[in-house]
Image (cartoon, rainbow, N blue to C red):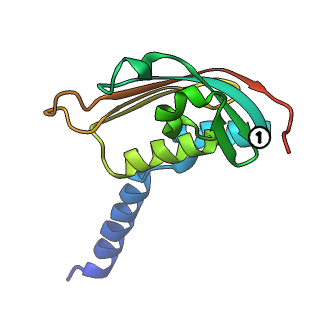
Amino acid sequence: MLSLKPLMTLLLATLLCACQVGSKDSAGDPLTQARQRWVDLGLQHYRYQIRQQCYCGQQALIPATVLVNGQQARLDSPDHAARAPLARTVEAWFDLIEEKQRKGWHQVDVDYHPQQGYPRHIRLDFDPRMADDEQQYWIENLVPAAARP
């Protein structure tokens, strides 16, 4: 009579291996890799230009300069007050991308800077069936800045 124990052990081992092969490796995730390149850079004080494309008026298309001092981000001009939500640290942009991915948005496409890791272009679309919900952001000309008190 044939024993089922060796056969069951082999079947269980095969299933466990298949689960491990199919699991997502976060170290290979582009967001994780980009975030690590950014952290390795160690910039705490920097400035960049932000542009937004959305169905939220022509004012959004005009570039604004964001100044980052540690964990504080602000727009350099009070004329851009309507765009204050765009004043984010790079880490906050990473958090936004991660949130949209976690929530299962239809499109979360990001182009990261190859050396510095920060997101250069972010394209978001919540639902392909909804019109005018798409958003795009461009982060450009990111350079170190002097610390401000």
35 or 135, which is in the foreground? 135
- Please give the name of the residue rendered at 66% of the width and 25% of the height, measured from the top-left corner: 48
Q: Position of residue 70 (x, y in %)?
A: 76, 46
Name the quadrant of the N terminus: bottom left
Instruction: Give the quarter of the image for residue 66.
Output: top right
**Residue 119 appearing in the image:** no
Name the quadrant of the C terminus: top right
- Element assignment for label 1: helix
The vertical placement of 1 against 60, above or below, is below
136 or 41, which is in the foreground? 136
Label 1 sits on residue: 40
Report whether 50 appears left or right of 9.
Answer: right
**Residue 9 appearing in the image:** yes
- Please give the name of the residue rendered at 48% of the width and 32% of the height, measured from the top-left corner: 83
20 or 62, which is in the foreground? 62
Report whether 147 appears left or right of 121.
Answer: right
Q: Position of residue 90 (x, y in %)?
A: 62, 38
- Please give the name of the residue rendered at 35% of the width and 29% of the height, measured from the top-left corner: 135
The vertical placement of 106 against 143, above or below, is below
Q: Position of residue 10 (x, y in %)?
A: 35, 68
Identify residue type, mark 1: Asp
Q: Label 1 crowding class (10 Å Cα cut-off): few <14, some 14-19, many 20+?
A: few
70 or 25, which is in the foreground? 70
Q: How many marks?
A: 1
Q: Position of residue 19 (x, y in %)?
A: 37, 59
